[in-house]
Amino acid sequence: MDEKGLGKRLQEARIAAGMTQQMLCQHANLSYSTLTKIERGAIKSPSIFTIQNIATALGVGLDQLLGVTPMPATAKKHRSKSGVTFVYFDINGCLVRFFHAAFTRLAVDSGAPADVVETAFWHYNDQVCRGDMTMDEFNAALSTELSLPNINWIDYYLDAIEPIPVMDDLVQWAAAHYRIGLLTNIMPGFIDAMQGRGLLPNVKYDVVMDSSKEKLIKPEAEFFKRATKAAHCPAEEILFVDDSRTNLMAAEKTGWHVLWFDDYRPDESAEKVRQALEPAV
């Protein structure tokens, strides 16, 4: 059985049926952790009885989920009432909870006060996110300042962050109806590492604007101009979801629609995004 292919087909069928992961779990009498693992392709040869229950709950054939026969066509892309056809999502503080816990762990490991750890980190963060500093150079700088040899920041980061569940469902829903992308200040290799661990919504992103590859960071105006060009649509058709008001103001100046994401109230913020993407009649 092709577990990865099965997971993708299952996810597409669920989204086409308008079901969240929680809803499908209830209809198929399945645990949430089992469903998410199947969608990620992390379960080797899931039970055929489990797959049959899922197919029945989704209203598709078992052969379709298994890839023997084609899946039904997916929904057409929409235009929202406000004219949006493309959505960019930030990552940190929007799709995953922020990584402050990594500072605490690094403070414990190094013996340095937490404020010293944060100061050292933010001193170099923009440089490495812009791609002006390599991860090896960044790790070496942290090791020197904190007197802790062999720091590998990506390990601290990946162990500290966790997905925001409501955003996983939202991004999957958005991807079924709109063209979507990621627009993020991020260090080199982090997006691939996050996807490898299943920490980002498992959808096909039409555009990925990675600051370390673009050699630009938010809120620089050129970053938003380049992202507009990559989206292949007018600025007024783009919605940007971010947890930084400074970044949103810069995007708004480019002509984008913007929505502030409050990770202390993720359900409320996600609902606002859904409302903003209500399709035009």
Image: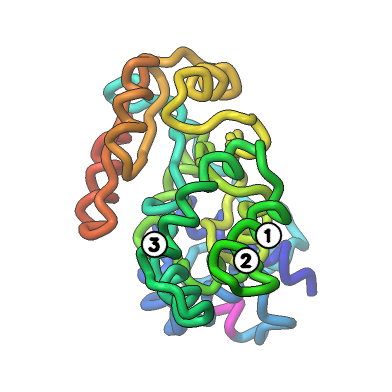
Q: Gap in Å between the C-alphas at discs 1 and 2?
A: 5 Å
- Label 3 belongs to which residue? 97
**Pointers 1 and 2 in contact (C-beta within 8 Å):** yes
Q: Amino acid at mark 1?
A: Ala
Image spot of residue 271 (x, y percent): 24, 49
Q: Is residue 124 within the magenta segment?
A: no
Q: Is residue 61 visible?
A: no
Q: Is residue 236 above or below residue 161?
A: above
Element under disc 2? helix
- Scheme of image coloration: rainbow
Q: Main secondary structure of the magenta part?
A: helix
Image spot of residue 2 (x, y percent): 78, 69
Which comes before the other along the chain, label 1 or label 3?
A: 3
Q: Amino acid at mark 3?
A: Arg
Identify the residue shown where x is 26% and y is 40%.
260
Q: Is residue 245 above or below residue 69?
A: above
- Magenta stretch, residue numbers: 50-54
For the residue pair 21 and 269, the one nearer the viewer reads as 269
- Label 2 belongs to which residue? 143
Element under disc 1? helix
Query: Which corner quadrant holds the N terminus?
Result: bottom right
Q: Gap in Å between the C-alphas at discs 2 and 3?
A: 25 Å
Identify the residue shown where x is 39% and y is 62%.
97
Q: Is residue 272 above or below residue 192?
A: above
Q: Gap in Å between the C-alphas at discs 1 and 3?
A: 26 Å
- Label 1 belongs to which residue? 140
- Image quadrant where residue 85 sits: top left
